[in-house]
Image (tube, rainbow, N blue to C red):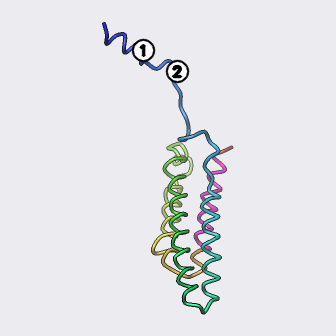
Amino acid sequence: MFSRLRNALLAPTVEVSAHCDLPCGVYDPAQARIEAESIKAVIAKANDSDDPDFRTRAVLIKEQRSELVKHHLWVLWTDYFKPPHFEKYPQLHTLVNEATKLAGATGTKGTMDAAVADQLLAKIDEIAEIFWETKK
């Protein structure tokens, strides 16, 4: 008797579903792009400086921003994009993988090459294009 009553009280009365963890509108690839723009600017400033202390600080900031790019892309990949997106855009897994690698140790985190930052920005733009298509 008690288990029937408990089950009746705890049984869901309304079924809900959501596309993402929170109502849509909290995710945006612009966060990753802002950090990548910062990386590119830091690389330019560091490469123009002869001050070793300034360059050291710039490298630290660039590495932190690179980690933030990866974080923002992973949040999109794991929390926003869902199986229907990956079915419609089969290149999405590869794009996110390539972008996070471009922000990693073999990418902007580990180099002072502005061209790598440009490649990262281009990948983020490709991801953003798909993101905005999914919002239509």
Position of residue 74 in the picture relative to residue 49 (left or right): left
Find out whether residue 19 is within the magenta segment: no
Find out whether residue 127 is within the magenta segment: yes
Looking at the rendering, the stretch of residues picked out in magenta corresponds to 118-134
Quarter residue 24 falls in = top right
Q: Earlier in the sequence, mark 1 or mark 2?
A: 1
Residue farthest toward the front in the current orientation of the protein: 53
Between marks 1 and 2 in the image, the one whose residue lies nearer the viewer:
1
The vertical placement of 30 against 25, above or below, is below
Q: Front-most of 48 and 82?
A: 48
The spot of residue 121 in percent (x, y) is 62, 68
The spot of residue 19 in percent (x, y) is 56, 38
The spot of residue 13 in percent (x, y) is 50, 18
Question: Which of the image's four quarters has the N terminus?
Answer: top left
What's the magenta bit mostly, secondary-structure-wise?
A: helix
Identify the residue at horizontal 47%, vertical 70% (top origin). 104
Q: Secondary structure at mark 2?
A: loop
Identify the residue at horizontal 54%, vertical 58% (top origin). 73
Q: How many marks?
A: 2
The spot of residue 80 in percent (x, y) is 55, 47
Position of residue 33 in the picture relative to residue 11 (left or right): right
Tell me if mark 2 has few (under 14), some (14-19) or many (20+) residues whose alpha carbon lies within 10 angstroms of its own: few
- Which amino acid, mark 2? Val
Tell me if mark 1 has few (under 14), some (14-19) or many (20+) residues whose alpha carbon lies within 10 angstroms of its own: few
Residue on which the image places disc 2: 14
Residue farthest toward the right in the current orientation of the protein: 136
Quarter residue 51 falls in = bottom right
Residue on which the image places disc 1: 9
- Which amino acid, mark 1? Leu
Q: Front-most of 107 and 11?
A: 11
Q: Secondary structure at mark 1?
A: helix
